[in-house]
Amino acid sequence: MNKLSTYIPSLILTVLLVLTTLASSVALLVNNNITADKAYTLTVDKNLGEVVKSELDKYYYKKYSSSGIPADVYTRFITADYISKCEKECIDQGFYAIEYNEPLDIHLPKNQHLEDSITSFFEKYASSEGYKIDSNFYKKVDGTINNAYNSVKNYTDVYKISALNEHKVLRQLSKLYSVKGILTAVSIGIEVVIILLMLLINRKSKVTVLYWTGTAGIIAGLAGIIPSCIILFNRYYDSFSIKQPAVFLAYTGSMYKFTDGFLASSIAVTVVGLCMLIIYGICHNKDKKQNVKPTLFK
């Protein structure tokens, strides 16, 4: 290990191994955590159906002064259960668009009770005011129903996938997301190649590879542990300025989950690195004892 011909190349490869270990950890986390199922599970865990229900109730009560339509025409039938189904539809279609690079096409589940409630209100209002119920009347009813669905979609799209799509961000994410499996395999493959190169360089003392890989593991682990602990301890994501409560909870919840996962993987990498150094120390001491020549007495 003291020879420059093995020490310097091993040191360089160790630095590269630290970087690829960090890259592999992030890639594996993306593969396992950034999925439609995990995103929807978070909305359930955070009870976002009730959060969005509260937001929509406030929206329709405020809107009454300008629309003249009582809030309960909408709120009675936009239930937390229906909102949860809408959230799932937005998430599923968003991830489908990202994964397959397809146009975003969100169609909320049909809410017949809501449509009937709006239609009934307009018919009663027209009857009391003596308005003629004709094709123009039903066009206005249909327009109000469509606006109701659009309002629900705006609030239940808690990850703001539609906004990302409008700003062309979804297409850029699709390019990365579609190759996440390849990037994970490549980063792990590079790690394997680096370790094989270390074995080749240190072929006269293969046990030394445990020292280098163990050191790389500890450094990579600490590089993940320290910033993750700072973020979690200071609740850094809570400082995000997002006005809609449901969107705030969805994004900060996702970021905290990802950080928790990164911290856990970093701790695991550190433990593996420590184990390698311990094994190296044991093996290295055995080699030293075997190389000690016995003292001869005359």
Image (cartoon, rainbow, N blue to C red):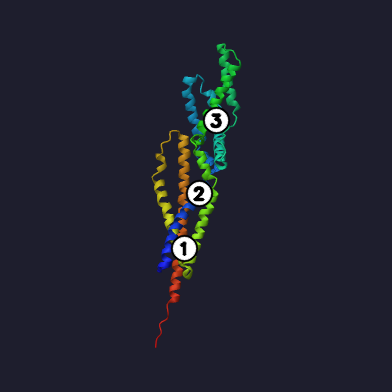
Q: Decide: few, some or many residues near mark 1? Use Cα within 10 Å; few <14, some 14-19, many ≥20.
A: many
Q: Mark 3 points at which residue?
A: 79
Q: Which residue is drawn at 59% across and 19% down?
A: 138
User: Cβ–Cβ below 8 Å for labels 2 and 1?
Assistant: no
Q: Is mark 2 on a helix, strand or loop?
A: helix
The amino acid type found where label 2 is placed reads: Leu
Q: In which quarter of the image is residue 89?
A: top right
Disc number for residue 276: 1
Give the number of the mark in front: 1 or 3: 1
Q: Which of marks 2 and 1 is nearer the N terminus?
A: 2
- Image disc number at residue 29: 2
Label 2: few (<14), some (14–19) or many (≥20) C-alpha neighbours in 10 Å:
some
Secondary structure under the numbered disc 3 in the rendered image? loop
Q: How far apart are marks 2 and 1 (CA)?
A: 24 Å
Mark sitting on residue 193 = none
Q: Position of residue 54 (x, y in %)?
A: 48, 30
Q: How many marks?
A: 3
Pinpoint residue 91: horizontal percent, then vertical percent: 54, 38
Quarter containing the N terminus = bottom left
